[in-house]
Image: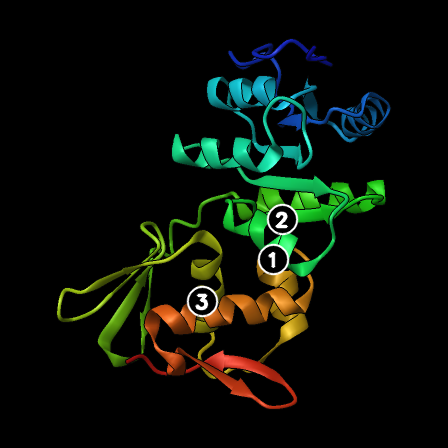
Amino acid sequence: MARSAQRPGDGAGGTDARPRVLLVEDEQELATLVAGVLHGAGYAVDLAGDGQRGLHLGLTHHYEVIVVDRGLPVVDGLEVLRAWRRCGVGTPVLVLTARSAVADRVEGLDAGAEDYLGKPFDLSELLARLRALRRRGQPDAAAEALALPGGRRLDLASRTVEGTDGAVVALSGRECALLALLAGRPEQVFERQTLGERVFGDADPAIVDVYVHYLRRKLGRSVVRTVRGVGYRLGGLR
């Protein structure tokens, strides 16, 4: 049965100005602890104890950020996340999990998560990551598109690379974020650790290699140039 630290919808009319967070976690002791810390940090928190309840709340209420456990009863956390994304829910999501392998984190990011935090975790780090997600979720109206080599452009709103010949290549959210960071400073060489922190929220740098591979597969091997011993920089496009 779902537990709610605050009734979903309270304050929706503007009486509660606190940022709202949805916490989907089936471990009651951990959920109570995290909810208390979030309250103390100034958040209004809704709790869900299984995937079905979390899915419903995420679809029917507005949140600034969502924290969801991967291993949930009734509906798996990643399935909940995929369902939110299919239904157009764009709220930044942080996935909690006891699985720490790179492949597991890549799966979570590909499902639509913005960040991934392994258990056990430090509560101060969780708060810092939520602050980063909230900043990341704020739209930048000034940056709608970025120029790319070869006369192409990266459309940040639609997450597509458009060519002068009319061809359009769709990117995932993380692919778009990685390419946008490189394109924003085309002459700069970025260390893998820096890209991991800036794009994937302090994820393992190995995930950067995976997403560089994805971009090269879609846009050609030269789109991201490897600088041996340092990291990556923007390259050309096929």
Question: Please, is residue 225 above or below residue 124 in the view?
Answer: below
Q: Nearer the viewer, residue 139 or 28?
A: 28
Tags 1 and 2 touching, CB below 8 Å: yes
Q: Amino acid at mark 3?
A: Tyr
Quadrant of the rendering where the N terminus is positioned: top right
Which residue is the extreme one toward the front? 74
Point out the tag, 1 or 3, that comes first from the N-terminus: 1
Q: Residue at x 44, y 70 (%)?
A: 184
Residue 200 - label = 1
Q: Position of residue 195 (x, y in %)?
A: 60, 68
Q: Residues within 10 Å of mark 3 (few under 14, many from 20)?
A: some
Query: Gap between marks 1 and 3, in whole Å?
Result: 15 Å
Q: Pointer 3: what residue?
A: 214
Q: Position of residue 119 (x, y in %)?
A: 80, 44
Q: Quadrant of residue 21?
A: top right
Q: Secondary structure at mark 1?
A: helix
Question: Please, is residue 87 above or below residue 95 in the view?
Answer: above
